[in-house]
Amino acid sequence: MVLGIITLLVAIFSLLGLISQLKVKNFFGVGFAAISFAVFGWFSVRTLISVIIGSGGTV
């Protein structure tokens, strides 16, 4: 559960970085922020779903 929350925070910070890099028009930074947001966002959502629905949180 903690890992899902931490990766969700990283995804939120990546989204903020994506928005700030779009304002500056740094497209290299936009690419990395978009990839980070996609990967960490997907992983956090799937982890939280696994913990809530399945038996993923047995700690």
Image (cartoon, rainbow, N blue to C red):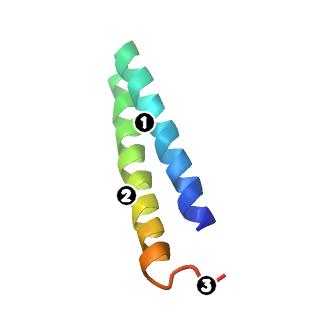
Q: CA distance from mark 3 to mark 2?
A: 21 Å
Q: Secondary structure at mark 2?
A: helix
Labels 3, 2: front one:
3
* Residue at 42% in and 78% down: 53
Question: On the picture, is 13 further left or further right than 45?
Answer: right
Q: Amino acid at mark 3?
A: Thr
Q: Position of residue 8 (x, y in %)?
A: 50, 52
Q: Which residue is mark 1?
A: 15
Residue flagged by tag 1: what amino acid is it? Leu
> How dense is the environment of label 3, judged by Cα within 10 Å: few (below 14), some, or many (20 and up)?
few
Crowd around label 2: few <14 · some 14–19 · many ≥20 (10 Å) = some
* Quadrant of the image containing the C terminus: bottom right
Report helix, strand or loop for mark 1: helix
Q: CA distance from mark 2 to mark 1?
A: 13 Å
Q: Residue at x 44, y 82 (%)?
A: 54
Q: Which of the two discs, 3 and 2, labels the residue nearer the N terminus?
A: 2
| Front residue of this view, candidates 2 and 25 | 2
- The image's mark for residue 41 is none
**Which mark's residue is nearer the viewer, 1 or 3?**
3
Q: Residue at x 44, y 53 (%)?
A: 40
Label number found at residue 58: 3
Residues packed near mark 1 inside 10 Å, few (<14), some (14 to 19) or many (20 plus)? some
Which of the two labelled residues, at mark 2 and mark 1, occupies the earlier sequence position? 1
Instruction: Identify the element where label 3 is drawn.
Output: loop
Q: Along the line of sight, which residue is nearer the eye, 30 or 6?
A: 6
Q: Classify 59 as above or below 31.
A: below
Residue extending farthest front:
52
Residue 6 position by quadrant: bottom right
- Count of numbered circles on the image: 3
Tell me the residue that label 2 is attached to: 42
Q: Is residue 55 above or below residue 9?
A: below
